[in-house]
Amino acid sequence: MAQEDVFKKIVAHCKEYGFVFPSSDIYDGLAAVYDYGQNGVELKNNIKQYWWQSMVLLHDNIVGIDSAIFMHPTIWKASGHVDAFNDPLIDNRDSKKRYRADVLIEDEIAKYDEKIDKEVAKAAKRFKENFDEAKYRATSPRVIELQEKRDALHARYSAAMNAMDLNELRQIILDEEIVCPISGTRNWTEVRQFNLMFSTEMGSTADGAMKVYLRPETAQGIFVNYLNVQKTGRMKVPFGIAQIGKAFRNEIVARQFIFRMREFEQMEMQFFVRPGTEMEWFSKWKETRMKWHQVLGFGADHYRFHDHEKLAHYANAATDVEFLMPFGFKEVEGIHSRTNFDLSQHEKYSGKSIKYFDPETNESYTPYVIETSIGVDRMFLSVMCAAYTEEQLENGETRVVLKLPAALAPVKLAVLPLVKKDGLPEKAREIVNDLKFHFNTIYDEKDSIGKRYRRQDAVGTPYCVTVDHDTLNDNCVTLRNRDTMQQERVAISDLNGIIADRVSITSLLKKLQ
Ligand code: GAP
């Protein structure tokens, strides 16, 4: 099945099974804004818990905060967001549609890549086992020609982006004869800068309303609380501050479902270190964060680092953790060495000293910062994409199963009475009432047992127990494993012991140690 179709199925599955709904659905939705349903919110909360506990519980030098979404507007001047948090946009005069100029060009580069891949795939089919891909790529005149065009375009585009040369970006669009996907014309406007921050007004106009922004990242809430936390927590460098919260960006091109949203959630940690030690900490955090991802068990081949060629003016190193989505390797998390830029800027704009006196070296300095920043929604999407599986069964049926790590699954155990009579529902409810204090346990009696298993497979429930007539005599139930579909007879009194450990976040955290 084409990867595009797989992705469509995942999006449809998210809606059908109560994971993600378009926001304002009965009003036909609101672009790039989504709501999480009854299963989605559980999965999302488990992801957040896994991150929070790995940061705050496992590190005695990391503490958490929860700062407000509204902040003093000068913060965004100091951070550079007012002046430089822009995307280059271009309009098509015929369709009246607005696009990101950089995205139009990147899509064009991707088209060259696709053409090259098609040539290679065709040759592989033709030459079968004798095919030497590296040799073919190096010698095929068609592939060489496409590769040269692609590289030249990439070089020109990178130079234009580095210089933020808006005229050159437009010229590339014209030279490459890129057309508007809606109107099919090349009737483009100039390229303009578009600030991504949403703004609103605080206070009544009579009192003199103040323009405030919805935060585009949670990080600044940590920077401006650095002194509060360092002093009240008597924190010693190196130490970190973690935060999970909403962020807002007026993305021009919002696509790929919850990959790029206008309202989303971030899990960010700023780690304050002594100047000169930042590169050492940068590699430590790269390693720590990659392990956090890989412990989920989707396979190391699903992840890679992508080091930034172009660094923001305040950064001295940056990398992305990319995940293999059905639409290619995409950024899920950023790890950035941000120097002392943010704290120095807040020192300058607020007029307050943010220096740290280091008792070990007897020096005062503005700490350097390593940031780890991951989007909850992108993480959610990566987990859904990796977990979504269609299995062909021996009887010819297809089973859709979400192979979620048990610790992240919305529901851990479904208790199913075989029939809706003979005291089986009562026995099943007894089990639920006992186990619900330990993990998310649900009761389901509707439809045949086979249909109920399928329903639980589709939402990723790792275990089901069936209460049958024998249960009333022997106090045992049939425990079914989601992935293997194997069933075993176990005593009701053993259920908590068997399941609790395997479905707890602690089971993941222990693997991180
Ligand atoms: N404080 C640094 C920062 O915000 P970023 O690379 O702009 O860095 C960090 O964002 C992470 O936030 C990204 O790796 C991504 O997971 C998530 N993210 C950013 N923009 C997003 C959007 N429009 N929709 C969903 N997630 C987004």
Image: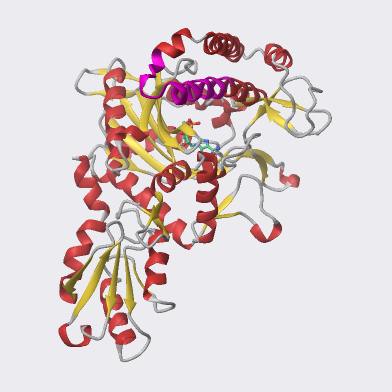
Q: Is residue 27 magenta?
A: no
Q: Position of residue 79 (x, y in %)?
A: 52, 26
Question: What secondary structure predominates along the stretch shown in magenta?
Answer: helix
Above or below residue 442? Residue 167 is above
- Seen from the viewer's position, the closer of residues 406 and 448 is 448
Which span of residues is magenta-colored?
A: 112-134
Identify the residue shown where x is 16% and y is 75%.
493
In the visual, does 158 lie left or right of 211?
Answer: left
In the visual, does 469 lie left or right of 172?
Answer: left
Scheme by which the image is coloured:
secondary structure
Above or below residue 455? Residue 142 is above
In the visual, does 407 lie left or right of 244?
Answer: left
Q: Quadrant of residue 334?
A: top left
Q: Residue furthest right?
A: 94
- Seen from the viewer's position, the closer of residues 264 and 69 is 264
Q: Residue furthest bottom?
A: 422
Identify the residue shown where x is 67% and y is 23%.
101
**Screen quadrant of the C terminus:** top left
Q: Is residue 122 magenta?
A: yes
Above or below residue 163? Residue 357 is below
Q: Position of residue 458 (x, y in %)?
A: 42, 60
